[in-house]
Image (cartoon, grey):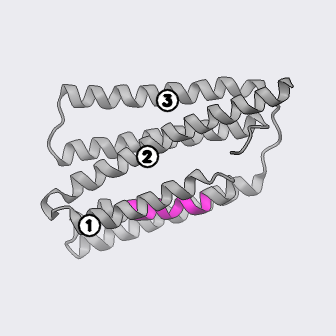
């Protein structure tokens, strides 16, 4: 378990939670749409879940004020930008290619694989092993959805699984960040 030693580390975990929560909500909404089950109850549940995750991220931002802030490493910012640019280019090329091949049903699973792959370099640049696990789970889900889910339900179920994985990733990030912050605070108090 990595101890929280700077405000930057805790703020980084909070930012990661926001990305996972937001994109997870988008995937879940796409799933509800594809499965044709958007109604007041499902939309309310989605909004409530997103709100709770975002409030938890805000709590981490507030908690970060207890630790010293250090200058950000510009190389990390550049690497993050490149990783995300490559990811979005790959998504666009893949979506275009699958559309041209009349295989749009596979787009959600393929995007899930790309997102999973992009978690590995993020785990390295942010020194956050949980990204490796999330990336591996997303890759496994991308393959499993194509292999085991009936084609007529593939888009909705693939999106559902991806959204759930991202929300679980946000919740795990919260739990790990709170635990690391608590342990760091206890060590500082001694």
* Label disc, if present, on residue 129 of the rendered structure: none
Q: Which of 156 and 4 is in front in this view?
A: 4
Which element carries disc 1, helix, strand or loop? helix
Q: Residue at x 16, y 46 (%)?
A: 35
Q: Residue at x 77, y 27 (%)?
A: 185
- The quadrant in which the C terminus is found is top right
Which circle's residue, 1 or 3, is located before the other in the chain? 3
* Label disc, if present, on residue 54 of the rendered structure: 3
Which element carries disc 3, helix, strand or loop? helix
Q: From the image, tell me which residue sits under label 2.
A: 166
Extent of the magenta region: 112-122
Drawn side of residue 163 relative to residue 156, left or right = right
Determine the CA span between mark 1 and mark 2. 19 Å
Which one is closest to the eye, mark 1 or mark 3?
Answer: 1
Which one is closest to the eye, mark 3 or mark 2?
Answer: 2
Q: Residue at x 32, y 69 (%)?
A: 96
Which circle's residue, 1 or 2, is located before the other in the chain? 1
Determine the CA span between mark 1 and mark 3. 31 Å
Q: From the image, tell me which residue sits under label 1.
A: 146
Drawn side of residue 188 relative to residue 116, left or right = right
Instruction: Tell me if I can see residue 111 in this picture.
Output: no
Examine the image and state in which quarter residue 29 appears.
top left
Q: What is the chief secondary structure element of the magenta stretch? A: helix
């Amino acid at each position: 378990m990595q101890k929280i030693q700077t405000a930057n580390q805790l703020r980084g975990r909070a930012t990661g939670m926001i990305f996972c929560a937001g994109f997870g909500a988008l995937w879940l909404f796409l799933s509800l749409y594809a499965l044709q089950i958007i109604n007041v109850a499902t939309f309310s549940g989605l909004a409530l879940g997103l709100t709770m995750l975002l409030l938890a991220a805000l709590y981490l931002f507030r908690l970060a004020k207890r630790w010293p802030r250090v200058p950000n490493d510009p190389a990390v910012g550049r690497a993050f930008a490149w990783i995300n640019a490559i990811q979005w280019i790959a998504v666009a090329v893949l979506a275009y290619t699958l559309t041209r091949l009349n295989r749009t049903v596979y787009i959600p699973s393929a995007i899930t694989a790309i997102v999973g792959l992009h978690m590995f370099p993020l785990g390295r640049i942010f020194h956050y092993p949980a990204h490796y696990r999330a990336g591996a789970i997303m890759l496994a889900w991308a393959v499993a959805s194509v292999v085991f889910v009936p084609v007529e339900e593939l888009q909705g179920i693939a999106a559902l699984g991806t959204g759930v994985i991202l929300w679980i990733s946000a919740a795990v990030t919260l739990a790990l960040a709170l635990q690391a912050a608590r342990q760091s605070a206890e060590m500082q108090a001694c």
